[in-house]
Every structure is written in C-alpha cells, then in structure tokens.
Image (spheres, rainbow, N blue to C red):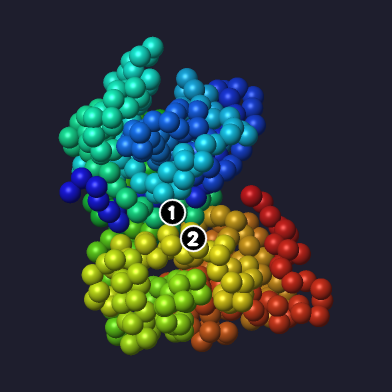
Amino acid sequence: MAIISRPDVLPIPENVTVHLGAPDAAAENITIAFPEYIKNVAAAELDPTWPDAALRANLFAIISQALNRIQTEAYRSQGYQFDLTSHGEHDQDFMPGRNIFENISRIVDENFDSYIVRRGTRNAAFTPYCDGTEITCDGLWQQGSVELAQQGEKPYEILQHYYGPDIDLVRDIPVDANFESYPLYPLRVGSRGREVGIIQHELNRISENYLSIPRILNPDGNFTRETEASVKAFQRIFRLPEDGVVGKATWYKIKYIYDSVKGLGELFSGRVGSGDFKRPADAFWQEGDTGIWVKLIQYYMRALSCYYHILPLVEITGVFGPETTEAAKALERLYGLPVNGRIDADDLARLYQDYLAKLNDIPEDCLPEEPVYPGYLLYRGMGDNNVRLIQGYLRGIAEKDPDIPMLMVTGVFDEATEAAVSAFDRKYLEEGQGDVLIGPITWSTIISVYHQFYQNEGSTNGCCHFCRDSTV
C-alpha cells in the first residue's frame, strides 16, 4: 500500500534550529517548532489558490526535503550547531515573521507528521522541487503539479509522477522529543543504549568501504572491546585522537563519513532510531502484562481521558488489568482501529502523538504534578532540558535526604543521575530492580517529594537547584 503507517521510520522532530544565513555566515540561530518552520517555507513556495491536491503534494515534498537534511545531519555532522539554514541556495527559503495563509497553515497542521520514503529505507527521501518554468530540476515541477491536480490526480499520484513508483507516503509518524544527535555523554567501553547501537551500525556500514575497520559482530548496543577496536581504527584513518572513545568530534565524523558512503539522500535502512533499543517495533502489551511500558500506556490513557470524556479513567499501576483493556478498546473505537483491547507499538506511537497534540487542552487538575511529565522515558545516556529539570529536583531532595546521592545538574542522564534515581526508587517507590528509567510515576513522585521538603521555604519549581552546577 502506497499511503501507509509504519512504526519503524524515523520520528518527526519537535523543534528545529535554523541558521539565519548561509552556513558559514555570521548569523543568528533560532529554534522553532517543526510545523512552524514548514508553514514559513510553504508560505514562500506555495500559492494558496492552487488546487488542494497540488498544495498537499508540494507540502509533502517540502517536509521530506527538510527532514532529509535533518535526519542525515547534513550540518551537525560537519560541526555546525544547527539543523537547517534559511538560505535558499543551500536549503529552503525561511524568513522569520513571514505571513502565513490560513489554508496553508491548516494543511500543514493536518500533514506535518507525514513524509515520503523510498521503499526499503527509514528516513525521509531527498525530494528536490522547482517552479518548472523559469527553473527546471530533477524533481517535482510546481506548475506541472498544478496541471496534474487540475486533471484529477491525487497528491500521491502527483508525487509518483515526479519521484518514481518506489515511494511510500508514510502517515501518523510520532513526534520525538528533541535531543541533539550527540548524546552529550562520551561513549566508551561499558556504555550501553540506543546511541551505542547507532554508532555500531554506522561503523559496520563504513567498514564496507574502509576494510581496515573491523566489523562489530554483535551490534547490540553494548560498547565492548570489539566496538572500541572498531572506533580506534576509524579514528586512526580519519586522524582523530586514537583513544577508542566516541566523543563529540568522533561522533559527528562517523556520521559525516557514514552519510558520505551511503549517499547523502538515502541512509542505511537499518539505522537505529529513537526508542529502538528500548522498545522493539513488534512489541505489544495486553491484559496480564506489567512494567514501565504499561505505566506509560496508562499515563497516556489517563491524560487523554480528561480530553475524551468517553474514555474510562485508568489508574497508573503498571498492571494491564481489565480497566486498561476497556480503555484500550475505547481508544481503538475512537481511532477507528480493530477492537482487540491490546496496545502494539504503532498504537503506542499514536497515543504519544495524540497526547502531545492535546496536552495544552487537558485541564490542569487532571495530571499529577507540575511540571507535567514530558511523555517519554528518560534513561542513561540521554541529554535534554527535561533531564536537566528532573536533576534539579533530585538534587534538592538529596540536600534534604542523605539516602539520595548528590548529583550535578548537567542535562545529561549520567552515572550519578542513574544512582540518584535508583536510590529514590528504592526508598520512595519500593522499586529499583532492572533498568533505571524515569517514567510518569517516578517523575511525578520526585516532584511531589521535592515539594514536601520545600513547601515552607518558598521554592515551588526546583529552579534554585535547576540552575546549580549547570554545564550545558
């Protein structure tokens, strides 16, 4: 099927950083929501009077063009601190403050979570486009797309006309929390997780072109001596310090060479994406299951029940019981899915996406503690503002409770953060076995305990601990 939903493609970024000029120009970087970036570019490229099918086809080309640049890390792999430029000769034309046509804004809101992929790949396809009159290109011709739409062609048929029959239009792609590609935490022997898996897969692909780099026989996300040997060989070839550690310079050099050997437009289909290491694409949860993923599902259900009043209220227990089954069935009916009372990986992605879309409209008294849980699991190796935020609360608790180890507020879920979370789980949640993850219950309990300690001291949001020791 040509228009499909696939849980294995790379996610949509929540935000993008745009350099307001050519790559090497001295210019400001701004970070905006991905849909707002697409609306801005679309307002420059699309005529609001075009037929709807032409508008949508061109929009999918714009989205895919932007995501291809982001997912291949065209700039970050060269050391730049941005994802895209505003310069039309390098990327797509972006201008802050541009007026947006109402119908274009609406179409973007409906479709920003969709993009074009080549079959057999996971990333957005490279989709050049031009006006087709003054400028021609090996891609979509805008004026020609209008004529095809007037002849009755649908958006996907227009795209096939220009990009070939081997494309899929993937819909309902989950929005991912924004992290810089580099995990902000050097990877070395003993590290494990999604980022290690990314590097192992990419080194193995590079080794096909650079035979002196030994293949990693078991790229399972564990940084072994075998992985270290492969990293050292790579560093030796590309004149980096040969220490076997994947720091920032080595990380981005690997990605730059990886994209070069694969071709900038189409990346290796086996690339590990966000969440792959922790959640296999074929996973599902049903009555009788327990654990952190069940808690996450129940959290989404509880939050959405405050928006969709037909949904039953579910307690976040981590046990997939009859109440959770009934809520799953209600959601399946709401989404027009087969009603079986179980949640698979695709359903989980849909729940997360719906949660993000409805979050601002959910009543304040519905969700547990402020700040509201971000909606994704936090674990060792990750780095973002939500990690920084929860470190601030943990540090505040550690100053009052000697059973919780002290930690630095860095924005990186490092070994010290893992130790603090583990100690907190054991004491306040009577947990602490297995992987150390921050899900919705741990998140809200950390904030609740912090408030109990500081309720009479005038500190209600953790900021006095949030800012301390910050290094990123």
Q: Which residue is mark 2?
A: 356
Q: Mark 2 or mark 1: which comes first in sequence? A: 1
Picture layout, residue 236 above or below residue 402: above
- The structure residue drawn at horizontal position 39% and vertical position 30%, both measured from the top left corner, is 50
Residue 29 in view here: no
Rendering quarter of residue 61: top left
150 relative position to 457: left or right: left
Disc marking residue 259: none
Picture layout, residue 376 above or below residue 66: below
Disc 1 marks a residue whose amino acid type is Val
- The structure residue drawn at horizontal position 24% and vertical position 47%, both measured from the top left corner, is 3
Q: Which residue is mark 1?
A: 175
- Judged from the image, the secondary structure of the residue bearing numbered disc 1 is strand
- The structure residue drawn at horizontal position 57% and vertical position 76%, both measured from the top left corner, is 366
Distance from Cα at disc 2 to Cα at disc 1:
8 Å
Label 2 neighbourhood size at 10 Å, few (<14), some (14-19), many (20+)? Answer: some
Disc 2 marks a residue whose amino acid type is Leu
Picture layout, residue 213 above or below residue 446: above
- Residue 54 lies, in percent from the top left, at 34, 33
Residue situated in front as seen by the camera: 76 or 368: 368
- Residue 68 lies, in percent from the top left, at 38, 36
- Residue 142 lies, in percent from the top left, at 35, 24
Residue situated in front as seen by the camera: 182 or 154: 154
- The structure residue drawn at horizontal position 23% and vertical position 34%, both measured from the top left corner, is 153
Q: Are marks 2 and 1 in contact (CB under 8 Å)?
A: yes
- Judged from the image, the secondary structure of the residue bearing numbered disc 2 is helix
- Residue 20 lies, in percent from the top left, at 59, 29
